[in-house]
């Protein structure tokens, strides 16, 4: 069993793991589940948001999975072609089998949706689900930023589109949905539900550990930068050190370090001459040799022209 602890610092995430208690999913501080249905369709229950209006320029105020109203909203920009109250994704790859309905979009059309008023100091994990409607192949493409994921949305019992480490732009995550005409043998694609998980920055005491060892683990200068930036970091426990860079869509950009290191302080230079300007996340994880302690530190970095 693992106990996951977080320490708050602006733009910086520390995660401490000890084999004591609790599940790994306790790192998620908020879950929002959106059921794309129609009036008179199947309700997802108190922990789901049932969005029934599929006309253009429609907005829905969201609640989290506890039923608590929050400031986040779901915005649908375009008209979808149809809705169904049957053959949703019950029995499919849902976190819970509740949705019997879905929205449908014909080929040669793209629907744009947005999740708005999000916390800019959080990272988000998004899952898109299809339907079990009819047979055949109906592949849906979902694009966030420059990252695109494709998944089977017809007779689907296992696939979903997953986006990790997504950072909002001015509080907004925008997604485009369309049918993959090359991979599909029909003229429809489906979207049954969206699950959004927020990973925020919390403050918790570090029990039975020297807290000084786990402070200010990761730093780079200059930041913002253009060209080269120097990364300094602490390895609080001897073990495997992995340092990677991700873009705002959650795609891995480069692996800077992946090797065993002893406890201590280190530095290295990162040449970003081939990197486009923008916001990135520098993520370092350390796993002790005994696998009893796991530490993750994530820093927001910015490259300018």
Image (cartoon, rainbow, N blue to C red):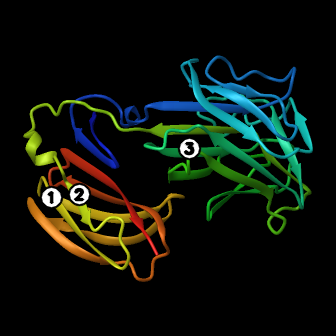
Q: Residue 9 carries which label?
A: none
Task: Choose between 92 and 113: the one closer to the eye.
Answer: 113
SS class, disc 1: strand
Relative side of 90 to 107, left or right: left
- Can residue 93 be spotted in the picture? no
Q: Distance between the residues labelled 1 and 3?
A: 32 Å
Q: Position of residue 32 (x, y in %)?
A: 58, 31
Query: Can you see residue 215?
Result: yes
Q: Mark 3 points at which residue?
A: 171
Q: Residue at point 89% right, 58% down?
A: 107
User: For the point 79% across and 66% down, which residue is it?
Assistant: 183
Residue 57 occupies which quadrant of the picture? top right
Label 3, secondary structure: give it: loop
Q: Which residue corresponds to mark 2?
A: 218
Residue drawn at x 27%, y 32% as measured from the top left: 203
Give the image location of residue 269, x and y in percent: 24, 76
Residue 234 image label: 1
Q: Residue 91: give x, y in percent of width and height.
A: 69, 34
Left or right of 86? Residue 32 is left
**Image quarter of the N terminus:** top left
Q: Which of marks 2 and 1 is nearer the N terminus?
A: 2
> Circle 2: is it few (<14), some (14-19), or many (20+) Cα within 10 Å?
many
Residue pictured at 58% horizontal, 33% vertical: 95
Give the percent coordinates (x, y) of residue 238.
11, 57
Pick whichever of labels 1 and 3 is earlier in the sequence.
Answer: 3
How far apart marks 3 and 2 lie (CA) works out to 25 Å
The furthest residue to the bottom: 273
């Amino acid at each position: 069993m693992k106990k996951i602890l977080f320490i708050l610092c602006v733009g910086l995430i520390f995660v401490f793991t000890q084999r004591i208690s609790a599940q790994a999913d306790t790192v998620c501080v908020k879950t929002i589940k959106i059921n794309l249905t129609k009036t008179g369709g199947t309700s997802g229950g108190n922990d789901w948001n049932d969005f029934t209006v599929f006309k253009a320029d429609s907005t829905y105020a969201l609640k989290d999975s506890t039923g608590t109203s929050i400031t986040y909203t779901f915005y649908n920009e375009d008209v979808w072609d149809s809705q169904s109250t049957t053959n949703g994704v019950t029995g499919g790859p849902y976190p819970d089998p509740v949705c019997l309905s879905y929205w449908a979009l014909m080929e040669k059309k793209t629907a744009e949706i947005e999740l708005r008023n999000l916390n800019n100091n959080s990272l988000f994990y998004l899952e898109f689900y299809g339907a079990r409607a009819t047979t055949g192949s109906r592949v849906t493409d979902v694009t966030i930023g420059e990252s695109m994921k494709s998944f089977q949305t017809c007779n689907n019992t296992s696939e979903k589109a997953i986006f990790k480490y997504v950072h909002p732009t001015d509080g907004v995550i925008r997604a485009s949905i369309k049918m993959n005409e090359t991979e599909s043998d029909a003229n429809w694609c489906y979207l049954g539900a969206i699950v959004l998980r927020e990973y925020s920055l919390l403050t918790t005491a570090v029990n039975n550990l020297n807290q000084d060892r786990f402070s200010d683990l990761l730093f780079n200068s200059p930041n913002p930068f253009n060209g080269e930036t120097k990364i300094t970091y602490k390895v609080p426990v001897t073990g495997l050190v992995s340092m990677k860079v991700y873009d705002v869509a959650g795609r891995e950009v480069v692996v800077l370090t992946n090797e065993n290191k002893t406890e201590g302080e280190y530095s290295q230079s990162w040449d970003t001459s081939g990197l486009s300007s923008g916001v990135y996340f520098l993520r370092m994880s350390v796993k002790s040799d005994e696998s009893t302690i796991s530490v993750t530190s994530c820093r927001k970095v910015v490259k300018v022209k």
